[in-house]
Image: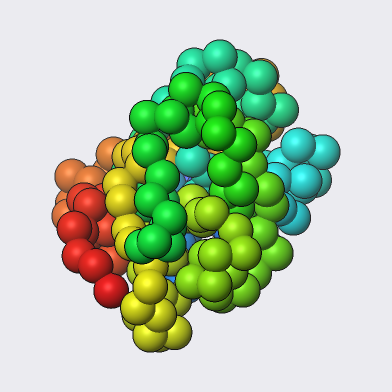
Amino acid sequence: MIKKLLICIIILYSFTLSAKEYSVAIYQLPTSDAFVNLFKVMGETTNNSFNTQIVPPARGVYLIENNQVDIVFPATVSSDPKKTALSKFDYSTVKVFKAVFVLYMNKNKLIDITELKNGNPRKYKIETTGSLAQLFEFQSLITTSLEASLKKVEESSIDGLLYAQEAGDPMLKNLGLKNILRKLYSTNDIAFGIKKGSVGGEIDKMLLEGVLKLKNSGKLNQIIAVSIKNSIYDNWQP
């Protein structure tokens, strides 16, 4: 009896030693609560715990770049490998879903997306969030409010807004603006942002293991159903 008790204690002790706690900054988005739940379930799956906080995207970037958190999510991977290499943090090996980016423009002031991707020679005034500004092929302006930026597009005080479909469309519908045209800009992988130089390391491997287990069980699609749905461009107009 004593021997069995000792074995149980040793197993429990080993289990406790293997569990680790990671700090996570989650971008403040309409789907933030689902992402918090993702880390909760992944903690149960990988025998770890995640201390999550929801922060504005620019704050999340600052925290991971300055090694104040272990993980930031969702991190958009640039389609340009050179820009990815210049990032001050790394992207996890595992990719979780895809994000669709839409250019919102005024119906009376149409923009050629090919020109934007070639460096924006016409110098269109395009706003985007600070966490994404370095991902695209041209120099953009930083928005401080999605709602305000959409209204500025409606009034033609700026030429366009480049934003994730997942966040931009609900706001556009809520505002009821009718003078805005939507156009697909790009579809990008979404990964976990991790500390620079940690690809292939402990955290990267743990995230890969956790996501693969959730995918195989079908839980991943259940938890982030909205993000999965929005990984395909919805060709609608206001």
Image height check: is 173 above or below 164? below
User: Where is residue 40 drawn, in percent x and y?
Assistant: 46, 63
Which colour scheme appears in the figure? rainbow
Q: Camera-side residue: 221 or 104?
A: 104
**Residue at left 69%, top 52%?**
142
User: Is residue 17 at all visible to an observer of this figure?
Assistant: no
Question: In the image, 185: left or right of 77?
Answer: left
Residue 88: image quadrant is top right
Q: Camera-side residue: 213 or 26?
A: 26
In the rendered view of the protein, which quadrant contains the C terminus? Answer: bottom left
Question: In the image, 159: left or right of 101?
Answer: right
Q: How many marks?
A: 0
Question: In the image, 220: left or right of 40?
Answer: left
User: Where is residue 74 drawn, in percent x and y?
Assistant: 50, 49
Residue 68: image quadrant is top right
User: Is residue 193 at all visible to an observer of this figure?
Assistant: yes
User: Where is residue 56 drawn, in percent x and y?
Assistant: 67, 63
Q: Camera-side residue: 48 or 190?
A: 190
Image height check: is 50 above or below 223? above
In the rendered view of the protein, which quadrant contains the N terminus? Answer: bottom left
**Residue at left 49%, top 16%?**
81
**Residue at left 47%, top 22%?**
118
Q: Residue furthest front?
A: 108
User: Where is residue 110 drawn, in percent x and y?
Assistant: 38, 51
Image height check: is 137 above or below 32? above
